[in-house]
Image: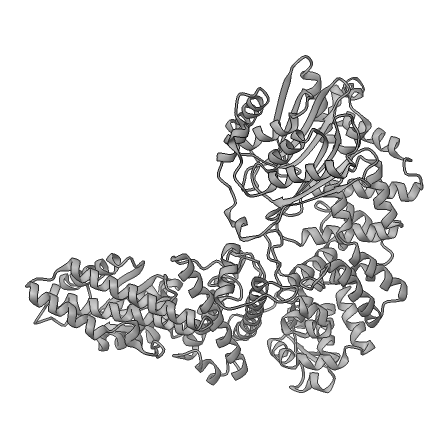
Amino acid sequence: MTVKAIANQRAVIDRRALADTIADLVRNAGQPPRQQIVALLRTALADGRAEIARRLTAKPSAGNECAAAQAFLIDQLVRVIHDHVVTAVYPSSNRSTGERLTVMAVGGYGRGEMAPHSDVDIAFLTPSKQTAWGEQVIEAMLYFLWDLGLKVGHSSRSLDDMVRMGRADLTIRTAMLEGRYVWGDQPLFDEAQARFFAEVVAGTERQFVAEKLAERNDRHKRLGDSRYVVEPNVKEGKGGLRDLHTLYWIGKYIHKVRDPSELVAVGLLTPSEYRAFRKAEDFFWAVRCHLHTITRRAEDRLTFDLQREVAARMQFADRPGKSAVERFMQYFFLQAKRVGHLTGVFLAQLDDQFAKKQPKGLLAGFRARRRLVRGYPVFGGKINVPSDSWFAEDPVRLLEIFVLADTNGLEIHPEAMRIAVRDARLVDAVRTDPRANALFLDLLTSRSDPETVLRWLNETGVFGRFVPDFGRVNAQMQFDMYHHYTVDEHTIRAIGLMNRIEKGEMKADHPLASAIIHKVVNRRALYVAILLHDIAKGRRGDHSVLGADVALKLCPRLGLSEEETALVSWLVRTHLLMSATAFKRDLADFKTITDFVAQVQSIERLRLLAMLTIVDIRAVGPGVWNGWKRQLISELYEAAEGQLRLGHKQHGRAERIAAKKAAVADRLGAQAALVEQTGKLLSDAYWIAEPDDIIALNLVQLDQAKGQALDVHTQYYAARGATLVTVIAADHPGLFYRIAGGIHLAGGNIIDARIHTARNGMAVDNFLVQDPLGRPFSEDSQLARIKTMIADALANRVKLVPQLAARPLARPRADAFEVRPRVEFDNAASNRFTVVEVNARDRPALLNRLARALFEAKLMVHSAHIATYGERAVDNFYVTDLLGEKIDSPQRLKAVEKRLLDAAGEETVDVAAA
């Protein structure tokens, strides 16, 4: 493989001029002036990089040109260094046959592709055992390369070593496979290539393909096993450059292709598929080169803080409803999807050919026999099409094949996938065909494995064409730190979760959903609502409202009744209602439940909304769903169900408290008497708000803290993967913000806070705390520090404001996002309290700053509900004035808003205020 032709090569580096300058220096100095030579080489490298960067700026999408120019630049420097070393540093006028050396580029450099800060992978080959001269030359060349600041991956081997190690090690074999002559002894390189293919490759093709497939699968699992993770790795991620390289490696190993274009000639890719690969490769190389240029290091992960800059460099612009960075990332994921599909087709065919495992067990003979299912040939567990024109003859078959695959537990044959991709546009003609819509609905609501088969349908492009609104969110990311996947991937995952809950596979994680799923009457409406809940993301306006309008048009087409259509539309419109109520409102407040029930209106709608809410949150990404959220959703569900079933807003409250007390008594065992003795100090609101395990801990602590001014208890709380910090102290204004400040100073991040005042005037405040990386504090020294800092903060032994202001921000990645602070007041959400909602960028000590602002505004905080959505914090406070009244004066509200906006803003805190 040769480096691709570079336009105006001498503008990148003029090798002959550089070599002549070095030769002149050596001649005039009498001996090699090393420092001056290194300076010349450094200047040549810097100038070359600057020229390549300039070209990339002029043509920001020309990734292949940039990668080839970088390889060319390194080639020329290696050649100059080699010639200088063998002529001036270690000249040998009469070399023996053993004193031969070839310099070979391997790995990505061997392919003639390099990003600006890629490693330089070089193999030095000698005919036999290394000679003293060869060792000196190699060492001198390496020192020059290191002096240039290059990261060099190098090996020095004889031909026999190369053969022996290539046979034993897949990594070495892959690197040598892409070996390219750079400089030195050309006949020696030719001999090495011939021996490599004759003695290492021959007869190991099947093994190589199987190992490469296993290696690819391991890599995907390590990086999240989805090509739709929102901070993708351009090089190693699923659908990225490494997947393209895998195809080249396999093609070269089996068919000895010297260039990717030859994959067409050997029948592994069609011409249009090869063009798609080249387009994706060019784009990914451009992204990778921009990443290296921006960061000045080998950075291959497209993190949030870099996405915006790369999008700007690649000249993506804002459009209505979609920012430049979202458009750029959508294009990125569409390319990754295309690569994923084509890689799948390519590798599956080779998998069939080389690495296919024979079916085992009782069904072996049955599965291996060729048979027909509804006219489709099935062999080896894969369903295919009988002819090239099968879909053209009846486009409804573009859906039928996927339904049959799902029903019969089959995979789609790679050839059928390839034809489906080619013919996907034909499905446009049957969008309104009742047969096609019935098949699609069967697939969506399948009890088998709809997630896998819908993903295949999406890979072919049929899904997005049959449901054009879904096509609009295909590969669409949401530019925030909360959502882990693109909208289409999130939706398909949510459908899969619902299917697994229905099968009873997730009872431990989702007891509520597992208990109510089989009571749901409108199952079809539930699955269609999951499909449509985010379908209007990326448009101007509220995606819930716009999605509800999409549902009114699409549901009748899919064959849903008028009643089902209205239900789906309502679910899509209100799909955020339950989570917003559970996470932002006080569930012990009558008004919270009454208002929620007024919108839900029936137990069936409550069940459906609960199911949709649970899978929606769970499918956002790993770690987003947790025990605390499960508990809040369950608590809201039970309270709403009780009110809907019994009809009266207060009916059932006494029963709920009695049931909670019985559960706590059961937990306390020998100390059960505390429920009545100490529990009488706590209000009904406390008993409803807190879970029974925390109440049990609080009662024991309250009993032991009698007569103490302060008692702090800390312990790991597994239900939430956090540390529970309970503070019992004499209640007084400012207590809450001081406790929060002490926790922040100890390095803690408060993820939830519940504030209560017992009838004896003692505050009982429960905080859930994690470290800045989302892990619980568990070491004794960490727990002791939390206790000490809270005590110091309450005793005024530390100056909270300046010390908190001096702490560095823990999450600089959040700087990539603009979160404008916003304050909203709601006097209708509670009969007793004003609810204050603050939206702001999440960062350490935010809660302390907001609580301090409320204290300075002379407001009492009765409960706080903290929710974080990636980089965005939404903190809700139930407050009154010092007389226990709501705040309704417009002037007072304006003044409170100003204080909170100042506290939530990004400016430096006035340390003198301490």
Q: Is residue 252 above or below residue 226?
A: below
Residue 81, quarter of the rendered image: bottom left
Q: Is residue 183 visible?
A: yes
The residue under the point 66% across, 81% down is 423
Q: Is residue 91 above or below residue 635?
A: below
Q: Is residue 99 visible?
A: no
Q: Is residue 275 above or below residue 807?
A: below
Comparing 83 with 331, the one in front is 331
Q: Residue furthest front?
A: 891
Q: Position of residue 895 (x, y in %)?
A: 69, 37
Q: Residue furthest left?
A: 30
Q: Split into 4 quadrants, where in the image is the N terminus?
A: bottom left
Q: Position of residue 723 (x, y in %)?
A: 61, 33
Q: Split into 4 quadrants, where in the image is the C terminus?
A: top right
Comparing 551 with 240, the one in front is 551
Q: Is residue 83 above or below residue 391?
A: above
Apparent side of residue 227 relative to residue 594 in the rendered image (left or right): left
Apparent side of residue 748 relative to residue 51 in the rendered image (left or right): right
Residue 708, quarter of the rendered image: top right
The residue under the point 83% across, 66% down is 552
Q: Position of residue 811 (x, y in %)?
A: 52, 45
The residue under the point 82% across, 28% down is 684
